[in-house]
Image: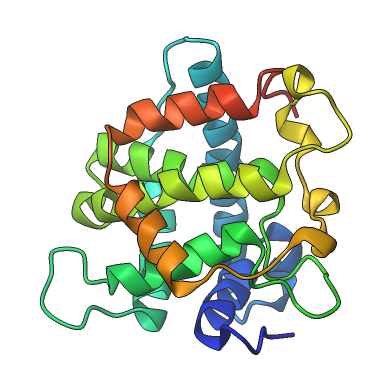
Amino acid sequence: MANERHPRASAMFTEYDRAANVDLFHLLAIADEEREERRRDVRGVGMLLVRRLSARRDSLPVPSYEREPVERLSRLQLELFRRHYPALEATPHGLELPAIGEAFLRFAHGDLRDAQGSEHGQPNGANAFAFAEFALLAGELQVDAPAWRALLPIFVQLQEVYVEIYWPRDRPREHWRFADYGMRQFDPSLHRDLRGDEIAALLALAGEGEPEARVTANVRRAFPGGVQI
């Protein structure tokens, strides 16, 4: 069910969930061969992104991946983003950045949850950290680099907003692990939607610092107990 307060952002994430969630692939009106290829891509790249997060936490070399699956997933995501947030003027990335930035921050903050508090419209656990990691991977491989470079600061800020809302309330901070995050951690009694001025302030903060260094710092703060899943 769409979120009536933020319909544009809600529509984008509803479509994103259908396009990238392997549990919903049976609903896609695409050829079986394409469906199975996407399933392999999402699972393979998804596992790699978690390994990259683990490597960052443990100060190990960050692994890379073969180019073609990353190209396919990049195209899938950017086409979807541009359908919902096309650039208002000619840009190298083709996106309406402030507006899509607001959408991602509201997503991380829990503002897009539906009235029933179901899984729709909110991050599927600490996989929220994968957006920035995919942007870094695409940049390393020079896959649609201008677009992912433009989105990366937003995704870095998303990580910090996400942890503020979905931190593991049932564990001491020093034991927080990747698997401890999730929708069950959301506390509706403490929640209110971000105000417009708060969104603007967060987007201004997104441009501060070196993005990859901030990702590494965010991973270490969020998962002191490890990135095992």
Q: Is residue 201 left or right of residue 165?
A: left
- Quarter of the rendering containing residue 212: top left
Q: Is residue 227 above or below residue 187?
A: above
Q: Position of residue 79 (x, y in %)?
A: 37, 72
Pinpoint residue 156: horizontal percent, then vertical percent.
Answer: 42, 43
Residue 30 in view in this figure:
no
Q: Point out the image quarter for the N terminus.
A: bottom right
* Residue that appears at 41% across and 68% down: 197
As drawn, which residue projects farthest toward the right? Answer: 170
Left or right, 24 with respect to 37, comes to right
Location of residue 93 by image quarter: bottom left
Q: Residue drawn 83% across and 70% down?
A: 117
Provide residue 49's location: percent of width, then percent of height. 53, 35
Does residue 203 appear anywhere in the picture?
Answer: yes
Q: Position of residue 45 (x, y in %)?
A: 52, 41
Query: Which residue is the extreme one toward the left?
Result: 90
Of residues 28 and 156, the one nearer the viewer is 156
Residue at 46% over, 63% down:
198
**Looking at the picture, does residue 19 appear above or below residue 11?**
above
